[in-house]
């Protein structure tokens, strides 16, 4: 089973999001955060989070790029519990047990998206508000092929 981790190529996410996700943390789309938003809510850093931010599942910060990688079942269970607790803490869900099904669905949606791609594939998200609600579109950036000679130095440490 695959999921996605936050990845940073530079420091830009530290400047464009109110709360940037930590490099390496597991991420989901997190589009639910914007379900009641209107154009009036789309200003400054909030607009950036809406437009193209993935949601980190540890810091609940945002990140622009995620990379597909394998997730272990025990990690998945902990992520589901943590997201369910987030629903209780931030959105007023009555209990973790009541929120667990929705948390599982959100993570399963992301896993389904990631399972379609090879490890190290990069993903971006783009959102817009439409008359029927928030629409998300995903962009896929395939991992580049590299020859081993470009990555490894051949020789001896004894030279």
Image: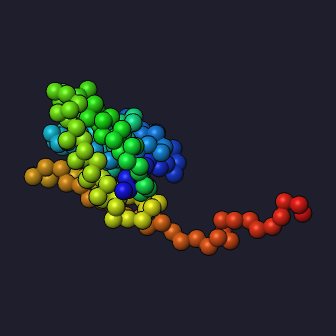
As drawn, is 41 to the left or to the right of 143? left
Q: Report the quarter where the N terminus lies.
A: bottom left
Residue extending farthest to the left is 132
Q: Which residue is drawn at the image coordinates 39% and 36% (left, top)?
A: 58
Q: Position of residue 59 (x, y in %)?
A: 39, 34
Residue 141 x/y as whole percent: 41, 64
The image quadrant of residue 56 is: top left
Identify whether 94 is placed above or below 11: above
Q: Could you tell whether 31 is left or right of 17 in the image?
A: left
Nearest the camera: 153 or 107?
107
Residue found 74% across the figure and 65% down from its top: 153
User: Nearest the camera: 5 or 80?
Assistant: 80
* Residue extending farthest right: 159
Q: Residue at x 53, y 71 (%)?
A: 145
Using the rendered view, name the quadrant where residue 154 is placed.
bottom right
**Residue 22's spot in the image, x, y percent?**
46, 39
For the image shown, how many numbered marks are present on the structure?
A: 0
Residue at 19% across, 54% down: 135
Res 146 seen here: yes
Most foreground residue, 134 or 145: 145
149 on left or right of 90: right
Residue lying farthest to the front in this orientation: 74
Front position in the image: 16 or 59: 59
Q: Is residue 12 visible?
A: no
The image shows residue 101, relative to residue 155, as above or below, that is above
28 up-or-down from 93: above or below: below
* Residue 114 position within the rendered picture, expressed as x and y whole percent measured from the top left: 35, 59
Say how the picture is coloured: rainbow
Q: Quadrant of the C terminus?
A: bottom right
């Amino acid at each position: 089973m695959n999921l996605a981790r936050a990845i940073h190529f530079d420091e830009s996410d530290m400047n464009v999001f109110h709360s940037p996700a930590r490099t390496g943390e597991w991420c989901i789309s997190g589009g639910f955060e914007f379900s009641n938003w209107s154009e009036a809510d789309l200003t400054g850093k909030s607009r950036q989070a809406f437009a193209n931010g993935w949601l980190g599942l540890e810091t609940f910060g945002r990140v622009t790029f995620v990379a597909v990688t394998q997730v272990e079942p025990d990690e998945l269970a902990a992520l589901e519990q943590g997201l369910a607790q987030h629903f209780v803490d931030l959105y007023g869900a009555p209990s973790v047990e009541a929120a667990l099904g929705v948390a599982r669905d959100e993570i399963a949606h992301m896993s389904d998206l990631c399972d379609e791609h090879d490890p190290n594939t990069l993903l971006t998200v783009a959102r817009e508000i439409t008359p029927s609600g928030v629409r998300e579109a995903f962009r896929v950036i395939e991992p580049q092929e590299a020859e081993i000679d470009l990555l490894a130095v051949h020789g001896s440490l004894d030279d």
